Image (cartoon, rainbow, N blue to C red):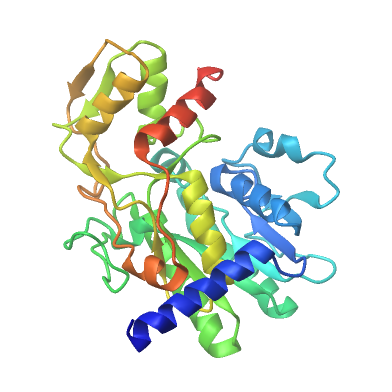
Amino acid sequence: MSAAANCGTLRAASLLLILRDGIDPMRVLITGAAGFLGSHLCDRFLAEGHDVIGMDNLITGNTDNIAHLAGNRAFRFVHHDVTNYIYVEGPLDVVLHFASPASPIDYLNFPIQTLKVGSLGTHNTLGVAKAKGARFLLASTSEIYGDPLIHPQREDYPGNVNTIGPRGVYDEAKRFAEAITMAYHRTHGVDTRIARIFNTYGPRMRLDDGRVVPNFVGQALRGERLTVYGDGSQTRSFCYVSDLIEGLYRLLMADFDQPVNIGNPSEMSILQFAELVNRLTDNPAGVIFKEDLRIQGDPQTRQPDITRANRVLNWEPRVDLPAGLEMTIEYFKDRV
């Protein structure tokens, strides 16, 4: 084994030792805690023995996602808009900024709020991390790559984004959030992490959030034809939520301050995905093709290059798409 390979193996082993044996209990602030990803993060940190303060203004989050945490003495929920000044009494070890509308329907309905939570909200949460000496993790997004001109997307790709298009409110909010995060890291010495999150699915997604997984699963469970816009040749890569949370936790614990793609590189067309959903739900209705109503700038391809995540975090997704969809379908059955 080469010296470089041996060094990588030792680093991966050290990381796994930290993750398995645990660390001293931490006090953690999670913004967007009542959302899809935020609520799963709350579960993970509580399961690891940490104290969690969950914060959300509930514009797109839902307290049903964290209702099971009621009565947990290690969890406290604060109803607050992080674009306003944030006060947290006592020490904090970690701040995870996950507050933001995250689906096209949501950020088109709340364009100003989306821009504000990415700018003012990131500024405020970084301020808390600086004041408390806490480690900071930013939930960025694959959307910072825009409609990419390279495939798959690497972290060194600067993106192809329309700043004034309808999607710009989300894309540019996240790009600004990355920029101010690195500015706080370089100027104030804040210990920062940046996760570029690719398409993620699983329990606690909203049926009405407009993304393809809940759209297709909801239609299939109702016995309807699945609506495919255009010819369905546009591609996506889907990561199950437990894999994503594992990647985020490893990133937080790693000694690495550059952006890291976290997602599943297994790519398929939207038409292939529709056929898979119909097969798993025993839906004979098939699909219906409609005029391409994509939002201006909607990417035609999306696939992460996870070389960096694999090298730095010793991480790769474990849940294959059929297995993840089966669990997601079970969740939605009682909600259709």
The quadrant of the picture occupied by the N terminus is: bottom left
Residue at the image position 82 percent from the left and 44 percent from the top: 72
Please provide percent x and percent y for residue 282: 34, 14
Residue at the image position 68 percent from the left and 68 percent from the top: 94
Residue at the image position 20 percent from the left and 31 percent from the top: 271
> Is residue 180 shown to the viewer in this render?
no
Which quadrant of the view contains residue 240?
top left
Residue at the image position 67 percent from the left and 33 percent from the top: 64
Please provide percent x and percent y for residue 209: 46, 34
Q: Nearer the viewer, residue 49 or 174?
A: 49
The correct choice, above or below, for 184 with respect to 97 in the image is below
Task: Judge from the rendering whether residue 81 lies leftward or rightward of residue 155; answer left or right.
Answer: right
Please provide percent x and percent y for residue 242: 52, 46
Which quadrant of the view contains residue 144?
bottom left
The correct choice, above or below, for 331 with respect to 195 in the image is above
Q: Nearer the viewer, residue 282 or 162?
A: 282
> Is residue 296 shown to the viewer in this render?
yes
Task: Judge from the rendering whether residue 184 lies leftward or rightward of residue 8; answer left or right.
Answer: right
Give the number of callouts.
Answer: 0
The correct choice, above or below, for 315 with respect to 41 in the image is below
Please provide percent x and percent y for residue 142: 35, 57
Task: Judge from the rendering whether residue 105 lies leftward or rightward of residue 78; answer left or right.
Answer: left
Q: Residue furthest front?
A: 1
